[in-house]
Image: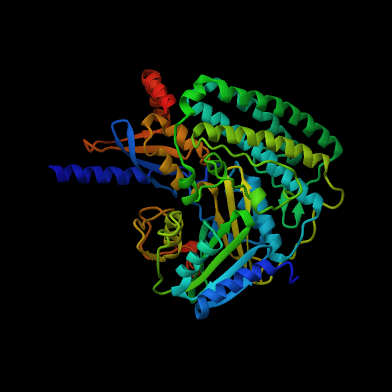
Amino acid sequence: MNVIVEVKLLTEEKRMFKIPVGPQHPALKEFENFTFTVDGELIIDVNFRIGYTHRGIEKLAESKTYIQNLYLCERVCGICSAAHQGCYAQTAEALAGVTAPPRGVYIRTLIWELERIHSHLLWLGVAAHEIGFDTFFMLVWRDREVVMDILEMISGNRVNYAMNTVGGVRRDISDELKYKILKGLDILEERTKYYKEVCMKEQTILARAANVGILTREQALKLNAVGPTARASGVNVDIRKDVPYGAYDEVPFNVIVYDTCDVLARILVRVDETLESIRMSRWILEHLPQGEIRTNFPRRVAENEVLSRVEAPRGELFYYIKSNGTDKPERLKIRTPTLANLLPVCEMLKGCYIADIPIVLAGIDPCFACMDRALFIDENSGKRWVWDTKQLRKYSIKWYKEHGEEVVRERWKQ
Amino acid sequence: MSEETSFENEVIESFKKVLGEKFVDGYVKGKRQVFIKVVEDAYKEALKYALEKWSAYHLTTITGIDTGEKIELLYHLLEPKSSLTITIVTEISRSDPKIDTVSDIFPSALVYEREVFDLLGVIFNGHPNLTHLVLPDDWPEGVYPLRKDWKPEQMK
């Protein structure tokens, strides 16, 4: 009898893994499946399975030219498309020994920072949505439209800007445009300052984010966490400061580090970084050098190998290119920040309640909605069940309505 | 030129001294980017040395390259405070690619080794959970998409 049940469970599990998640989803590179081992409400262990949207981009890149690869790399991720394309372009430039002109580099850096603003605001909205604070979610996303409009004014696109090319950027910024961007940045700064105040004072957020999803500094260092996730655990790493690229060795900015190691710290790191990015964008616009925006790039690249990193909104993004003398790369390797933050997020989830899963998972900013479904195993009864994000979110909001007070009281005691 | 790359050369020299004959090659690719090529059985020693001497604690990723006769493994390390990037390069047999796991030194290698295993078929001895990471569960055995002789057309 037992055996039959086991077999049934296995086939059920197998069937579950095969459910296809749109391979051409616009936003997601990593669609993950997490398996949680729970004891009552407590999470004991976490396992993950990724690869649902693996599109074989690294293989495909070997059969495309350096120019074609620009647009392929841009499509690795919809949210941080400029980070990917810019990182690819700067790696290819280093590979061929080409230096982009200063104005091109400044415009590229500006797009990176505007993208960080849009990505962090998007995340802030998602985080608010995950804890059931939908008013905040809608307000943040309304104001995010300001930066989306700025990006559209510059590039003509909201998501894939196609601004970079190997050897510089493709579009210039006129004085008229500069004025419009500066005006937009003023609105963004005012609103983001208000949101920071809300995040620090609003009980709805504090109750769900403070002391939740702890990742200690030691764990973050040991598991090589990257980006805001690491900085929220007191690790002072930022590729923009550590390995300066683009115009970051000239642009003044602060690295935001919080040391409370919880979801609240991850929220505040991102809000503060948004403010920092707004200031940086303004500085770049005011100090935009004159001159060309791009230079020539050879069609064929001699044998060489180069790696480079950028600080994408989610953390360290890594590109490695090896050339072989033809017009196509021999090998292109991409390491996205979410992959680096997978082990840290598993560590964070251990010891959390089931109801904390949505916000803790969202806390690392996994490409938008990584968690399409979750499988639960009750340690004592061996019962298994599957939930999707929507059910889980509903459950978490309901659970906190019932148990919220005692849990929060306990957390504040610590 | 010599002044600009003196720090990089110092790193290469230190590896040369420690590894002796196991050191194959060392070269500089760009500012603060050092590549150290070592023989197969010295890669772990080199990684440990990079961690202890140069405190390059951040393993960014592991890149696997099919060079035709061999499989090349690149361990990209970073020491953020001095912007030092050390890449440990080693070559292993292509017909029977096996190498020990480094997850005992760098826990984050657990994920990256699975990726290399999946796409290039390198077996990492001692890895606790060497299963598919990015490929589907029903992917045929012994088919490794990032090897040069595999073409997408072969997929039915």
Rendered view: A37 above or below B112: above
Q: Quadrant of the C terminus of chain B?
A: bottom left
Q: Residue at x 73, y 50 (%)?
A: A249
Quarter of the view holding residue A20:
top left
Q: Position of residue A126 (x, y in %)?
A: 53, 31
Residue closest to the eye, A134 or B146: A134
Q: How is the image coloured?
A: rainbow
In this rendering, the count of numbered labels is: 0
Judge from the rendering whether residue B62 lies leftward or rightward of residue B2; answer left or right.
Answer: left
Rendered view: A68 above or below A114: below
Quarter of the view holding residue A333:
bottom right
Judge from the rendering whether residue B88 lies leftward or rightward of residue A8; answer left or right.
Answer: right
As drawn, the residue found furthest toward the left would be A1
Do we see residue A287 in this rendering? yes
Q: Residue at x 76, y 46 (%)?
A: A107
Q: Quadrant of the N terminus of chain B?
A: bottom right
Do we see residue A85 in this rendering? no
Rendered view: A398 above or below A352: above
Judge from the rendering whether residue B105 lies leftward or rightward of residue A292; answer left or right.
Answer: left
Q: Position of residue A102 (x, y in %)?
A: 80, 52
Rendered view: A131 above or below A5: above
Residue closest to the eye, A137 or A44: A44
Q: Position of residue A310 (x, y in %)?
A: 63, 51
